[in-house]
Image (cartoon, helix red, strand yellow):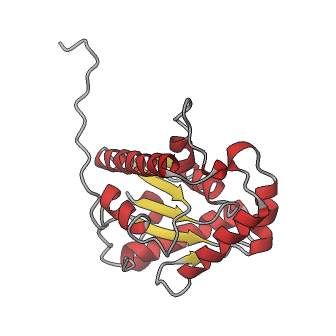
């Protein structure tokens, strides 16, 4: 009898495209094993929505926050608000790769996941291209993009490393507008609460499973 408590886990490989149901109208996304990337600017509410969505699914689901993983670095933390440099970029890249490994391992062991990140459309190699390399072609990207006044208001309620200047928020929001016309699904949650946004995310993920976006 093995008393060590060691459990053999399947290794995580690249996440493949999800298999669409034979009848998409009968799909229940709440029971599907998926990997979702929630994209949005600071203040879009993506982390709150991702956590809420993961909490209420009918199947085991993990929320993997890029910012949380990035802040695992305590001594020597490179805060880009103090100036973007090779150290802050390296820590972002490490965090994304770590999140990707985690997502692959969760999926390999029957646990869905949702990741959140402020991915820019004008940096495809670092952004979506990087996530595809880290996770796999089955990752489903969804953009959450409310109006500028909303993200400014939400950012003002933040504290610590995650609160940005109004100028930085406006700059990021302007770059995020490039997702329009990209073909990725976009949710404008300017007038929606968290519950409504999560319900819309379910609808978008259902459509993406039936017909994965090209990216």
Image-based side of 108 in relation to 162, left or right: left
Residue at 76 percent across and 58 percent down: it is: 165
Report the residue that reaches farthest toward the left: 1
Vertical comparison of 178 with 40: above or below: below
Image-based side of 176 in relation to 168, left or right: left
Residue at 52 percent across and 53 percent down: it is: 57
Q: Residue 64 location in percent, x, y?
A: 49, 48
In which quadrant of the rendered image does the N terminus lie?
top left
Residue at 22 percent across and 31 percent down: it is: 8
Q: Quadrant of residue 44?
A: bottom right
In which quadrant of the rendered image does the C terminus lie?
bottom left
Q: Residue 49 location in percent, x, y?
A: 63, 58
Q: Residue 194 location in percent, x, y?
A: 70, 61
Vertical comparison of 122 with 117: above or below: below
Vertical comparison of 44 with 214: above or below: above
Vertical comparison of 155 with 40: above or below: above
Can see residue 187?
no
Q: Count how many numbered circles sit on residues in the image.
A: 0
Can see residue 193?
yes
Image-based side of 196 in relation to 117, left or right: right
């Amino acid at each position: 009898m093995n008393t060590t408590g060691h459990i053999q886990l399947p290794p995580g490989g690249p996440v493949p495209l999800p298999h669409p149901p034979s009848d998409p109208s009968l799909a229940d996304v709440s029971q599907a094993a998926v990997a979702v990337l929630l994209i949005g600017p600071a203040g879009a509410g993506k982390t709150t929505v991702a956590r809420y969505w993961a909490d209420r699914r009918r199947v085991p689901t993990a929320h993997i926050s890029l910012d949380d993983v990035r802040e695992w670095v305590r001594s020597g933390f490179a805060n880009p608000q103090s100036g973007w440099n090779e150290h802050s970029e390296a820590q972002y890249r490490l965090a994304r790769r770590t999140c990707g490994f985690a997502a692959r391992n969760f999926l390999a062991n029957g646990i869905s996941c949702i990741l959140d990140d402020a991915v820019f459309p004008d940096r495809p190699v670092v952004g979506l291209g990087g996530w595809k390399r880290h996770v796999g072609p089955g990752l489903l990207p969804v953009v959450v993009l409310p109006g500028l006044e909303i993200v400014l208001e939400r950012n003002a309620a933040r504290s610590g490393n995650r609160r940005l200047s109004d100028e930085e928020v406006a700059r990021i929001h302007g770059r995020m507008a490039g997702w329009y016309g990209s073909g990725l699904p976009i949710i404008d949650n300017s007038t929606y609460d968290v519950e409504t946004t999560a319900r819309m995310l379910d609808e978008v993920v259902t459509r993406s499973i039936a017909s994965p976006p090209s990216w």
